[in-house]
Amino acid sequence: MSLFYPLDTARLRLQVDEQRKSRSTPAVLMEIIREEGLLAPYRGWFPVISSLCCSNFVYFYTFNSLKSLWIKGTASTTGKDLMIGFVAGVVNVLLTTPLWVVNTRLKLQGAKFRNDDIKPTTYTGISDAFQKILQKEGVLALWNGTLPSLLLVFNPAIQFMFYEGLKRQLLSQQEELSSLQVFVIGAVAKAIATTVTYPLQTVQSVLRFGHEKLNPEKRILGNLFSIIHLLKQRIRRLGFLGLYKGLEAKLLQTVLTAALMFLVYEKLTTLTFRIMALKGK
């Protein structure tokens, strides 16, 4: 995530700031650096890394625990992988959404928006952001965007379904996957999942940002009507392709990150089992 973090910064700016023109990812990053400084693409790095650690721990722990309990001696199937991935995603969303709401706010703090209606925030850190959101917006604001996040659990579920399916296909022809094969199937699986669910990811980012103009009736952000309203509003202002604004940066970031993550994940898993086997002897 640290390696490809600037790509995620470019993606978030394009999703939230409707007035920012959709350019190539390098052009957007150069624009941010020119206007806000060299370190601007890494703004909010620590809260994002903290959230990512918690989120990945919850997801992988739940996924593998459920898989070991449910499958237990039987053959794994694509349907089972999808269901287990879905349940693990729901658990992850309910537990970690407040962290992602806070880090979205911190990532956008100090940004030079093209949209003049957006008011800047003045958080001094993670704990201060939690306190101010609770005081000014209420406890439910920490779960802004929960509904699209719950719908987005299909993203890792779809990702794991394709990853496990491709992995099984390759392992039926050979004993062990190479690093390159793991990297490629991880990238392909994530690219498919990201493209299918990207419009919901855009809505999720906008709701987590929690800007006042999106909630004129003081309703809880994140309900189904808010999602439909935001999707229609974006299509009306930017056209259908507006739903995919920032997709290039998102694909570059998530595909490369996921591929690298799966590569490290497989190597660590293999290493752990080898160490356990040696200790067992």
Image: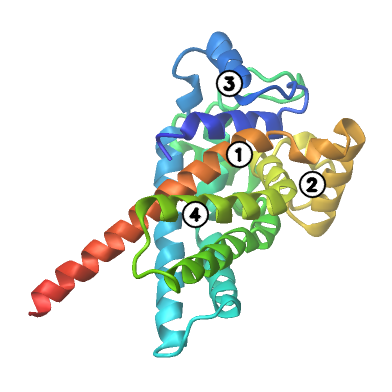
Name which of mark 4 and mark 2 comes first in the sequence.
Answer: 4
CA gap between label 4 and label 3 equals 24 Å
Q: Secondary structure at mark 1?
A: helix
Amino acid under disc 3: Pro
User: What residue is pinned by disc 2?
Assistant: 218
Percent position of residue 70, x then y:
47, 86
Could you say which disc has been placed on residue 250 in the image?
A: 1
Front label number (2 vs 3): 3
Percent position of residue 247, x then y:
68, 38
Asked whether, in this view, residue 229 is left or right of residue 279, the answer is right
Work out which quarter of the rendered image holds the C terminus and state it: bottom left
Q: Secondary structure at mark 3?
A: helix
Q: Secondary structure at mark 4?
A: helix
Say few, some or many: other residues with alpha carbon within 10 Å of mark 4 (under 14 / 14 to 19 / 20 or more): many
Q: Tell me the residue at 89%/32% (across/down).
A: 237
User: What residue is pinned by disc 3?
Assistant: 26
CA gap between label 4 and label 1 equals 15 Å
Q: Tell me the residue at 45%/90% (across/down).
A: 74
Say few, some or many: other residues with alpha carbon within 10 Å of mark 2 (under 14 / 14 to 19 / 20 or more): few
Q: Tell me the residue at 68%/34% (across/down).
A: 246
> CB of mark 2 within 8 Å of CB of mark 1?
no
Say few, some or many: other residues with alpha carbon within 10 Å of mark 1 (under 14 / 14 to 19 / 20 or more): many
Say few, some or many: other residues with alpha carbon within 10 Å of mark 3 (under 14 / 14 to 19 / 20 or more): few
CA gap between label 2 and label 1 equals 31 Å
Name which of mark 4 and mark 3 comes first in the sequence.
Answer: 3
Name which of mark 4 and mark 1 comes first in the sequence.
Answer: 4
Could you say which disc has been placed on residue 186 in the image?
A: 4
Work out which quarter of the rendered image holds the N terminus and state it: top left
Residue in the foreground of this view, choosing between 235 and 102 = 235
Residue in the foreground of this view, choosing between 227 and 211 = 227
